[in-house]
Image (cartoon, helix red, strand yellow):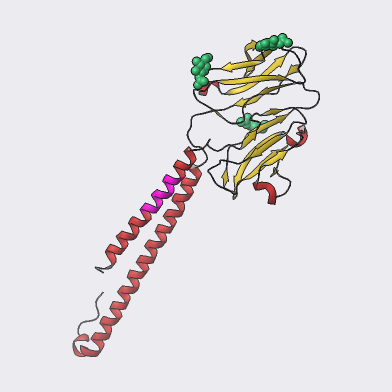
Amino acid sequence: MEIKFPTIRLLFSVMNVLLLLVIVAEVSDSQTHNSGFPQVVPNRQQFFQSEPITISCEGLNGRTGWRVMKKINGEVRTCASTWETSTGPCKIFNAYPSTDSGEYWCEMGGIQKSNTVNITVTDLESHVILEVPAHPVMQGENVTLHCRKKDANSNYTAKFYKNGISIGSSSSGNIMIPTVSKSDEGLYKCSIADAGESPESWLTVGTGHPTVPYLEIYLGLGIGLGVLLLVILLILAGLFQHHKHQQTIRSHTEDTSLTPSAQNSPVSI
Ligand SMILES: *[C@@H]1O[C@H](CO)[C@@H](O)[C@H](O)[C@H]1NC(C)=O
Ligand SMILES: *[C@@H]1O[C@H](CO)[C@@H](O)[C@H](O)[C@H]1NC(C)=O
Ligand SMILES: *[C@@H]1O[C@H](CO)[C@@H](O)[C@H](O)[C@H]1NC(C)=O
């Protein structure tokens, strides 16, 4: 018994240190990256038909094994044409409205999911898009939204709207939102006279806190606690065996050497 207690204490310490290391690693890892969004190149949510788009999971928690997934018209599948190639970047060479407009995210092992980016591809009749970043913009940054006119060869005046309300117009086609804060989040669109209106896209303002990786911490904690419980059970089982073994020895000794007195005093414990 004197040997066992330090062993148990040591085991607990090792478990605690391991658990802490897991948590610290996860938190620091998640904070060094742009918390959990797929990367879209070029970095915007709206595209004209036939433009190229690349979506990848680079930089997500610094791990490999992420897959680019998409949901188009309610149907979920890998962004790449086959499951085998879906861990690499998903290259769309000619964006097409009905097959490429939808939600995109990264997924690993079916449990871990990144945040979702909505991509809108306009049809041939549309001549205006608003370039809203696909990634969240960080609090305090200046953000420029560009209202783009298809095949424009002269300057044009664009009007900008947030949540359907006009927020101004600009003869350069750009609007700058200085030092963004959470209150600048919303649905943005723009319009150009004689050319039409862009689709709406959501501008996300990030605060730098990790979002997705908390799942990993809980998962790590769960596994850690599970292992801890198993170790405790094993130790208890070991103690029980040890106890039973000693009892057997004792009753054996009593059987052989103390036969007369053993009859008066039954085996205790
Ligand atoms: C944002 O723009 C203002 C001018 O409007 C400039 O003074 C400031 O340095 C810019 N901030 C950043 C982070 O670029
Ligand atoms: C467009 O605007 C830029 C400045 O914003 C100016 O330098 C340029 O001359 C303009 N081009 C035309 C065709 O008006
Ligand atoms: C993306 O699109 C879906 C479906 O239209 C919508 O429910 C969701 O709120 C959108 N998300 C963002 C961030 O715009």
Question: Does the magenta segment cover residue 211?
Answer: no
Q: Which x, y percent locates residue 107?
A: 61, 45
8 is higher (above) or lower (below) than 218: below
Foreground pick, 68 / 224: 68
> Would you place residue 171 above or below residue 117 in this image?
above
Say left or right for 4 vs 128.
left
Q: Main secondary structure of the magenta part?
A: helix
- Identify the image quadrant of the N terminus: bottom left
Residue 123 position in % (x across, y down): 78, 27
Name the quadrant where ligand 3 sits: top right
Count of numbered badges drawn on the protein: 0
246, above or below 221, in the image: below
Q: What segment is highlighted magenta in the picture? A: 16-25
Q: Compared to 45, does 265 lie above or below?
A: below
Looking at the image, which residue is at 71% across and 39% down? 91
Image quarter where the C terminus lies is: bottom left
In this rendering, position of residue 148 left or right of residue 259:
right
- Quick check: 143 left or right of 259? right
**Residue 128 location, x and y as percent?**
73, 20
| Along the viewing direction, whichever of 62 and 69 lies nearer the viewer | 62
Asked whether residue 157 appears in the rendered view, the answer is no
